[in-house]
Amino acid sequence: MDKQPCVYILSSPNKKVLYIGVTSQLKIRVWQHKKKQVDGFTQKYDVNILVYYEIHETMQDAIYKEKQLKRWKRGWKNTLIESMNPNYEDLFEEL
């Protein structure tokens, strides 16, 4: 399977909780979140709906963007998500 560095945002079903992560295998990683195979925050708060992702040239670029996004205010994150996915639909199936 090809590896492609990317940063992604998951949401809880009620859209109140967001999670920002980075991976080189987005489809596999999101599937792991959906199947609750990732212990911790996403499992505890039922955060498994892929609402945003960005593909990057290098893992270093993806990690840099992840760190940036984690410092953003919630409103900025919502605006970013809505630029790609105004209805917060699960983008997992399009991967």
Image: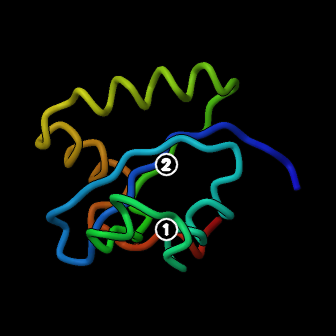
Image-based side of 76 in relation to 39, left or right: left
In the current view of this chain or complex, which residue is farthest to the front? 39
Image-based side of 3 in relation to 54, left or right: right
Q: Where residue 45 is drawn, which disc sits there?
A: none
Q: Where residue 91 is drawn, which disc sits there?
A: 1
Q: Where is residue 29 in the image (x, y as percent from the top left)?
A: 61, 60
Tell which of 3 and 81 is nearer to you. Answer: 3
Q: In which quarter of the image is the C terminus?
A: bottom right
Query: Does the CB distance between marks 1 and 2 fall below 8 Å?
Result: yes
Mark 2 residue type:
Tyr
Q: Where is residue 74 in the image (x, y as percent from the top left)?
A: 13, 42
Total numbered labels: 2
Question: How busy is the neighbourhood of tag 2: few (under 14 within 10 Å), some, or many (20 plus)?
Answer: some
Q: Quadrant of the N terminus?
A: bottom right
Residue at the disc numbered 2: 53
The image shows residue 90, relative to residue 3, as above or below, that is below
Tell me which residue sits at (27%, 53%) in the image.
Answer: 82
Q: For residue 14, which quarter of the picture?
A: bottom left
Tell me which residue sits at (20%, 60%) in the image.
Answer: 17
Mark 1 residue type:
Leu
Q: Where is residue 67 in the image (x, y as percent from the top left)?
A: 38, 25
Q: Where is residue 92 in the image (x, y as percent from the top left)?
A: 55, 70
